[in-house]
Amino acid sequence: MKKSPLPMVQNTSSKDEKRTKKETLVKLLRWHFGHQEFRGKQLEAIEAVLSGRDCFCLMPTGGGKSMCYQIPALAKHGIVLVVSPLIALMENQVMALKEKGIAAEFLSSTQTSNVRNKIHEDLDSGKPSARLLYVTPELIATPGFLSKLTKIHNRGLLSLVAIDEAHCISSWGHDFRPSYRKLSSLRNSLPDVPVLALTATAAPKVQKDVIESLCLQDPLVLKSSFNRQNIYYEGGFCELVPGMEIAVRYKDLLHDFYTDVSSVLKSCGDVCAIVYCLERTTCDGLSAHLSKNGISSAAYHAGLNNKLRSSVLDDWISSKIQVVVATVAFGYDLLYNFKLS
Ligand SMILES: Nc1ncnc2c1ncn2[C@@H]1O[C@H](COP(=O)(O)OP(=O)(O)OP(=O)(O)O)[C@@H](O)[C@H]1O
């Protein structure tokens, strides 16, 4: 169902008007997304970009980063351009927005030329219906697309550029993507469009690199707390605390961490689990220990060939095995190669 539009935010400055602005934004949040209040630094980020200021926003995974550009798309005339590293993520977000009656599109090589042409026609029209346009950094790097963006901007129709997973721009980050570095061309071509960089990667080196590479000007830097209420830090060896979902224990204080992991898993019952380790040899050793103790498990790391990795992943997803003992290669493959792309 398509909802009728709510009032746009006006560019005003007095205290009363500021309150009205906030109320309007909260109304948009409730009306379109059904959330009662903004979380963490969302409102600050939204207000910053709506006032035309660049913003660097650090929020934990699942912290609600997308709201920081989705609300501005509804609050202001024009299009919000969202740069996202994964087609699967773009597709998911666009689908979810369309279900809420919000006009959003993505452009990717996976679409038929018919679909792409329709989106381009909409963008070329003086009054595009799309409020959010999701694209990959590779598309931004093409001269044709950049000149299209410039035309949209010259018609006063580009309100914000949001760079999701902005840590991909930094070679210090864990997901470096060379095409992200070319995003600096956006600042040159669209000098007065505010840029919002969003990431969950907290390293100061990465933050500095993102801000410099994107040529953010006097950005508002926002950092949400990464403290999770459901994570409990233990001083020594003890049992999982009732009501707490996760307990953190110091490995060095444990007599035998293989045995400890094994008994924690057993106490959790018939649940599936991922145990992350820093080294491949630890994955192999711990997985063998768990299997010997009656917990069906397999190791997963970059030292195994693709076929074996894929079959471990399938076995875990289909619950044939209960536990995967993995290096970070597991999360990366899951997201980028096998199931979600
Ligand atoms: N103000 C809010 N109140 C309640 N729920 C919210 C609020 N903002 C966002 N959410 C919900 O939080 C969840 C995570 O949001 P979102 O996907 O934007 O997080 P994210 O920070 O982009 O995560 P990721 O790092 O995985 O990309 C979603 O289900 C979203 O609807």
Image (cartoon, helix red, strand yellow):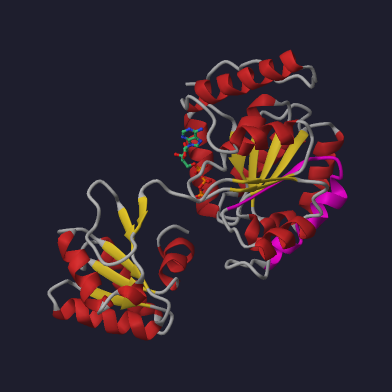
Residue 131: in sight, yes or no?
no
Rendering coords of residue 164 (x, y %): 62, 50
- Determine if the magenta segment contains residue 191: yes
**Which residue is situated farthest in the top direction here?**
16
Q: How far across and down, in percent of the image, does residue 277 sit? A: 38, 75
Nearer the observer, 75 or 116: 75
Quarter occupied by residue 72: top right
Residue 117, placed above or below residue 205: above
- Between 106 and 328, the one lying in front of the other is 328
Q: Is residue 66 above or below residue 240?
A: above
Q: How many marks?
A: 0
Is 314 situated above or below 106?
Answer: below
Left or right: where does residue 104 sit relative to residue 284? right
Q: Report x, y in % for residue 10.
A: 76, 19
**Residue placed farthest to the left in the image?**
294
State the image quarter where residue 262 is shown. bottom left
Residue shown at 36% from the left, 69% from the top = 250
Q: Is residue 144 left or right of residue 297?
A: right
Residue 171, above or below 123 = below
Q: Is residue 7 magenta?
A: no
Extreme residue toward the front, this view: 235
Residue shown at 78% from the left, 38% from the top: 53
256 lies left or right of 103: left
Work out whether residue 147 or residue 237 is closer to the camera in this orientation and state it.
237
Residue found 64% across the figure and 27% down from its top? 74
Q: Residue 291 lies in what quarter of the image?
A: bottom left
Instruction: Give percent across and percent down for residue 11.
Output: 79, 22
Q: Is residue 87 visible?
A: yes
Residue range of the region highlighted in magenta in the rendering: 178-199
